[in-house]
Amino acid sequence: MTITIIGIGLIGGSLAITLKENGFAQRIIGVDVSQDNLDKAIRRRLIDEDMGLEDGINAADIVVLATPADAMLHLLPQILDKVGPQQVVIDVGSTKERLLAAVKRHPSRGRYVATHPMAGTEHSGPEAAIPGLFEHKCTVLVDTGDSDPDAVKMAERLYRSIPMRIVQLDCLSHDVHTAYVSHISHISSFALALTVLAKEKDESRIFELASGGFDSTVRLAKSSPDMWVPIFRQNRDNVLDVLDEHINQLARFRSLLIKNDFETFYRLIQDANEIRRILKK
Amino acid sequence: MTITIIGIGLIGGSLAITLKENGFAQRIIGVDVSQDNLDKAIRRRLIDEDMGLEDGINAADIVVLATPADAMLHLLPQILDKVGPQQVVIDVGSTKERLLAAVKRHPSRGRYVATHPMAGTEHSGPEAAIPGLFEHKCTVLVDTGDSDPDAVKMAERLYRSIPMRIVQLDCLSHDVHTAYVSHISHISSFALALTVLAKEKDESRIFELASGGFDSTVRLAKSSPDMWVPIFRQNRDNVLDVLDEHINQLARFRSLLIKNDFETFYRLIQDANEIRRILKK
């Protein structure tokens, strides 16, 4: 099996290592707008060789689209223009509604399976690629009814080989869910980092005290704007809804502090503790 | 050296293991309102024996006060009533202004050193105590000018034995700094957990997708209200200031989304990325 990965960054590069190591792919071809990324990917042995977009697509059994979400919007139709009836195309992006709308009536729509392997780190680029990133995590397959059954089966085989759990969602639900369990966490971290960085202007030693709790809540604030701005742009309406709710929750804590109502504050923390049920580690 | 630890939870218990293992203490006595906690602490070998408050104080070279912050307010004056001129008392609490005001004119004020070892986890109780929790982290010594020099030296020896870095701050600065680098992270996590838990009522499968980024931002939402409500109560004014700033930062992201101003959004993320400088891992 030959897999061509378009966009050899954190996600594309990590998939490349994983699928080569587990034997699912015999040959991995990298395509990237940055020759520097491709050189790094070859030096790190993430890919076997690099090619231009057209040659890369022609050589592939499976094409994996792993660029930032804005580039996907124009690349996916171009890729579908070129694929034959035996080839399969998957994307690994974090937003789906607009991307699926962009290829809704494409004659090769059936060869494409929209997927979202839910894993990542705050780092980016081929130097951030790591094996094991996806292991035992969850992949969402989106609107599979619009894909050819054999293409869906191939995408499932790919993800099961890692292995990953597979969940199916329609594109609207997918984009709402990711706004809640991924996108808002990033905005919250960016805002928290800005809050403390602004204070650092007066209190230069403030970060001497930062410890584990702070690190874990602002870790995501290191994430790349090149990846995240296109996601927020494409999932703007859902992100706005969740952001409003998050601000409301914070405003509730604020008003309880103002009123010195620490009994209700206590009960809200108990309610928040329910998250233990979800985070079992 | 005999150390009596009052409050054998996550912090007291972790200090107990550490100071016994590194040879700083030959004997650790535990005092706790919960006999269940004391029994667990003995079974886990966190402490050598348990005693009542008065006996525990009498037997100690150093008394470590490690209860929730509200209990400290009435325990610290009682402890100082009982200590002699060779004994040293330290607390390990997360807020200092009110605690220091409560003993400002106490005749034994000099025997007391206010300290804050900056480490913790989202778990609590003696079962959560772990060795290595404090290693190479930062301890703040607060308002040391009000403590006897020999007592300060003893507190420094204790923390250096772990080893921890030592920073000195006045109590007002300490409480502002911890509001920024610790307390707000917890409120943000509680609010984020409540936001997604509320959505779960309609979308029962929403957490299937939660992955590493979500886990790290809501991890602190598992933290105990018994520990945190007294902290928020005592550091209310600073926490309110930081919470206002954090809500303002989120409102800025919100307004940029509404205006579709993704250029400014991009620049704000770049500014937030500056946090890389602080979080070097």
Image: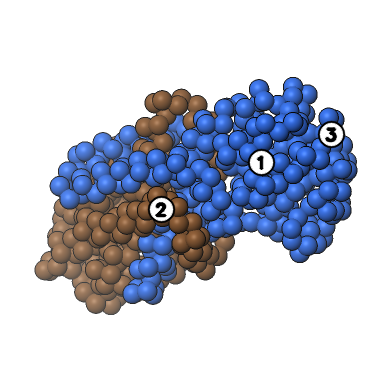
Chain colours: A brown, B blue
Q: Where is residue B252 in the image (x, y as percent from the top left)?
A: 25, 43
Please name which of the two marks, 3 or 1, marks the residue nearer to the observer: 3
Q: Where is residue B48 in the image (x, y as percent from the top left)?
A: 86, 51
Residue A29 visible to the viewer: no
Q: Which residue is drawn at 45% across and 39% down?
A: B238
Judging by the rendered image, the residue that carries numbered circle 1 is B92
Horizontal arrangement in the rendering, residue B152 relative to residue A120 (left or right): right
Point out which mark residue B84 bears. Answer: 3
Q: What residue type is labelled 1?
A: Val
Q: Do the residues labelled 1 and 2 touch (CB within 8 Å)?
A: no
Earlier residue among tags 3 and 1: 3
Please name which of the two marks, 1 or 2, marks the residue nearer to the observer: 2
Helix, strand or loop for disc 2? loop
Q: Where is residue B159 in the image (x, y as percent from the top left)?
A: 72, 33
Mark 3 Cα shell of 10 Å, populated few (<14), some (14-19), many (≥20): few
Judging by the rendered image, the residue that carries numbered circle 2 is A259
Helix, strand or loop for disc 3? loop
Horizontal arrangement in the rendering, residue A82 relative to residue A193 (left or right): left
Q: Do labels 3 and 1 share a chain?
A: yes
Question: Where is A19 relative to B136, above or below?
Answer: below
Q: Which residue is drawn at 48% across and 35% down?
A: B176
